[in-house]
Amino acid sequence: MSDVALLVLNGPGLARLGDFADDACGVNSLDQVRRACEQLGSELGVRIDFRQTDDTDELTRWIRNDVNQFDALIINQLGCVDTSPVDYPTYRKQMEILATLSVPVTEVHMTNVLRDDPDRFSALRGPAGKTAMICGLGLDSYRVAIRAAAGAAVGSAAP
Amino acid sequence: MKLLIINGPNLNLLGTREPDIYGSDTLRDIADRCISVGKTRGLQVDCVQSNHEGQLVEWIQKAIDSADALIINAAAYTHTSIAIHDALKCFDGLKIELHISNPHMREPFRHVSYVSSAVDGVIMGLGVSGYEHAVELVADRLCA
């Protein structure tokens, strides 16, 4: 096991993934996502710290206080914009904290938000040149993000 | 299983064009690595590039009968080409849009993609290694 560590954050609504995830997404629960991420982490020899909260203040604290202990941040910001009680513009403003970070950030979505919700979607703004976005690949959105972040952290293209 | 990787305008200049954004690898370097990753997974990978929109459309059409999956970096045509969107809609296999940089972090005219709404998933901003990770993903799906 290398000393590479990745922080995987899941925002409001994602605990209730089973309520709205559809066949296109191919995922039944957030626990399924957690297990897939941790399994890939152990295959690649990197530590995965997988967290979810419905509290946007807590999410902000996690990013602000903890992210520098990790090699990269992978974040699924919001479960489902349509059913979430979160005030989206305010939340986006809070997430501007990402732009001040020094670690690479990968935004992930299991569904293709660019196809399904293009008017509402706007990408998170992370560190210049270190901000990726992956969507529409179900569980594989997380898996690609983890492989890429792990690969970048250990300095090889494809671990 | 066959994967076709289609690259659009100016990607033939990779390695020399704005290396701070796109890196120093050439498209040949990237294609060689993708072919090699595919070989280890039992996936035949072909990699093509053109600066001409119509050529990209014809490759997508040809893929309908000859490829199981597509990875497309339509480059600047991403933001303009309804023809590429329409052609992609006719391809039933796994389709992934790929960008080396993250267009959403760049000029506003790059924030619209006509490709995104015609594909299954999008990978952007992982640098040139995004190609290899996308090939791995296609192999996971098709060659497991």
Image: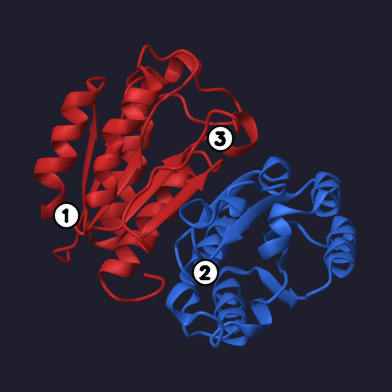
- The dot on residue A113 is 3
Query: What chain does badge 1 belong to?
Result: A
Instruction: Note the chain letter of the blue one.
Output: B
Badge 1 and badge 2 in a common chain: no
* Relative to A84, A112 lies left or right: right
Q: Name the amino acid, label 2.
A: Glu
**Of callouts 3 and 1, the N-terminal one:** 1
Q: Residues within 10 Å of mark 1 (few under 14, many from 20)?
A: some
Q: Nearer the viewer, residue B18 or B94?
A: B18
Badge 3 and badge 1 in a common chain: yes
Q: Is residue B43 visible?
A: yes
Q: Is residue A112 visible?
A: no
Q: For residue A61, which quarter of the picture?
A: top left
Residue at 41 percent of width and 25 percent of height: A79
* Relative to B14, A132 lies left or right: left
The residue identified by callout 1 is A70
For the residue labelled by badge 3, is the local secondary structure a helix, a strand or a loop? Answer: helix
Residue at 62 percent of width and 52 percent of height: B109
Vertical order, B88 against A34 (above or below): below
